[in-house]
Amino acid sequence: MTQQRAFRVAVLTIAAIGLVVMACTSDEKESAAGNTLQAVLDRGKVRCGVNDAVPGFGFLKPDGTFAGFDIDFCKAVAAAVFGDANKVEYVKLTAAARFEALASGQIDVLIRNTTWTASRDADLKADFAIVTFYDGQGMMVRADSGINKLEDMRNATVCVLQGTTTELNLDDRFRAGNIAYKPLTFETNETLEQAFTQKRCDGWTSDKSQLAARRSAFPASAGGPVALKILAETFSKEPLGPVTRDNDSDWHNVVNWVAIGVITADELGVTSKNLEQMKSNPPSPDVARLLGVPFKGGQVSNFGLGIGADFMQKVLAQVGNYDEVYQRNVTPIGLAREGTLNASWRKGGLIYAPPMR
Amino acid sequence: MAVLTAFRESTLWRRRRTRRWIVQSWFGFGVALVLLYVASRATRLQLGLDFMGDRAGFAIGHQWLTDYTGSESRFNAYAVGVFNTVRLVLAGLALATLLGIVAGVARLSKNWLVSRLATAYVEIFRNTPLLIQIIFWYTAVLLQLPNLERGVEVLDVVFLSNRALAVPWAYPEGAFVAWLGALVIAAAASWLAHRWRVATEERTGRPANPNTTALAVFLGIAVVGFVAAGTPLRPELPERGVAGAGIQTISGGMQVTPEFSALLLALVIYTGAFIAEIVRGSIQALPRGQTEAAMAVGLGGYERMTLVILPQALRIMIPPLTNQYLNLTKNSSLAVAIAYPDLVFVGRTIQNNAGYAVPVFLAIMATYLVMSFLISAIMNWLNRRVPLGGR
């Protein structure tokens, strides 16, 4: 009797192993075929890898919802694909884990202040979409510290996040300037901030956008934002944008052109507020093409992205154009858009959309 | 239905051997499938380690006895990580054993307060997650120490702040390796002297002070060797300074960072609680007659413990102790949580910069495997060496 039971257990175990193997194999087929767009449509949700700790960009609010500049681009993709900006499953990731999460198929798109670099593009098998935010690395110190430039930081301890280009730029800059320093490398921003608040380190280096965000939310018990200052020098180029997997063109195109559409709408002056009016009476063929409506009774142009010609209507209605996204998220943390690299190219900035036609 | 009944009752099917054979071949088939799947995945991965020779590009803040810089190879960075793990683990093993023995013996104390305190310690720290304890020690205790400007000084040689616990230290220089050789010779000589004095004791029946002689021989050779090698240790005092635009610094001596201390504290206190239980169990496993016999020959509490009980309990202790040592070693990888660059930390940084997740993780696993095997080998050797007397 017991032997019979043992036999049954053995057979069930084998069956279970077999099922697991089959499950793994079929799972692999999905990602190996490189058609994330189809997988996303089947699932009914976009899995978006995000930050949860940078106010203004990717931030988990106390009520449990995400908000920020990057989050809005996740929403824009969902709005374009499903017509519903809420069909997003946010996956919060550390800087060190994000590329694994993307490569393994845990997420469909990574929109987590990720810098476009050659080695990431090639070695890490990631595909970068258009740059949505031009950032650069800076250094934040305590306002009362007497540090005014990086050269003042000889023998300082610098807090930095692990596994980031930030860590590499820091070493390059301090080595080039012959400035001895000690890095203190953290895995999460929360522990880093605690160490910095307790004066465990003299400086905190990161992308300036992140520093501004952190500074704006610096606890009043530790002196509030005025207790900190960000040094003028920017010592790296950090173009940030959405990232997809290599060899996944259909999906990459969707992500890329949704982002471009958001920028184009800003250039053409189409906002969530004047959308209805623009839709019924497009002032130019450009606007008509963007919104997927006929211009003076002509044909509707479809770019062949596989998500319907009117996708930008849904994006603009639910998320808004680049300037709306920027003003809603980034301006409140103290980074004005005018006069920076993130101004439109018409106003001397670098935000420029390839033609949508 | 008839066929099924016939099949059930067929003798071939009912035979034990047949069924065993079927079960085993199915199992073998399953294992083969899994292996095949793993192999098919693995062949498509790049498993070379060439990227480890490239420039690392990132600096490491916690270094002791090493002077790695960001322009060295990734392999060197990884080596610093391994060394950081090794020194953490070695200190942890020694202190956890000590704490475990003290707490384990204390749990059996007849003193109500002592035994209750020991019980409270064991139950609190054994039953809360280690990661939480590490973060607690780091953020709630060590980071809350006064900062460098307000740091505590003891006699101008020891500085305590949340930057570091800085203490005087002696660093090797010159003919230090030659002196280490002299120490080995001293150890051998003192062992011979000890044997000789014990033999004399047994022959004459009079005390011949074997321990004192051995110590004297060791110290004698060590001191003479130290002078002969030209005092190859350079004492260094920690020093406070101000650099650049008023940045407070502490340099020199040995600096124990709060990250290292928090990890060490957490690992020692956590593992110590488990070891205490092992020690208590091993002592209680001894027959009561041993204690009674020791009392009968008039041994006091301390001598009873160190001469009779602990030596016998040791051989019961060693196998479970080995498990705890291995646990401590593996648990040290939680360093990632609080900015201590151990081998996992450095490995992950390399992997994030260069890609190659699989080779990096294989390298990390192989490193832990080697460390665990070493600990197991030493403990097994010790287990065989401990004399197995009758109970």
Image: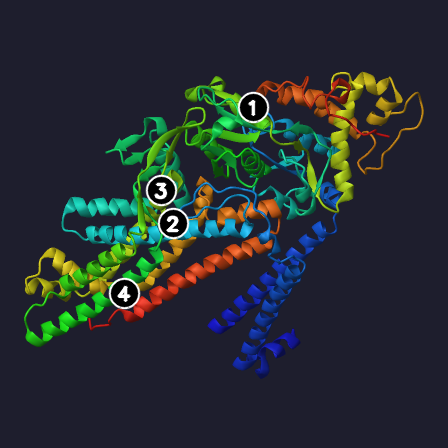
Report in which chain the residue with disc 3 lies. B
Q: Position of residue B159 (x, y in %)?
A: 30, 34
- Quarter of the figure with the N terminus of chain B: bottom right
Horizontal side, residue B347 vs residue A27: left or right? left
In this view, A336 is above or below A193 = above
- Bin the neighbour count of mark 1 within 10 Å (Cα to Cα): few under 14, some 14-19, many 20 and up: many
| Kind of residue at disc 1 | Ala
What distance separates the C-alpha of mark 4 from that of mark 1? 62 Å
- Residue designated by label 1: A212
Report in which chain the residue with disc 4 lies. B
Q: Nearer the viewer, residue B308 or A138?
A: A138
In this view, A172 is above or below B316 = above
- Residue designated by label 3: B261
Q: Are marks 2 and 1 in contact (CB under 8 Å)?
A: no
In this view, A108 is above or below B248 = below
- Bin the neighbour count of mark 2 within 10 Å (Cα to Cα): few under 14, some 14-19, many 20 and up: many
Tell me the residue at 30%/56% (across/down): B229
- Residue designated by label 2: B88
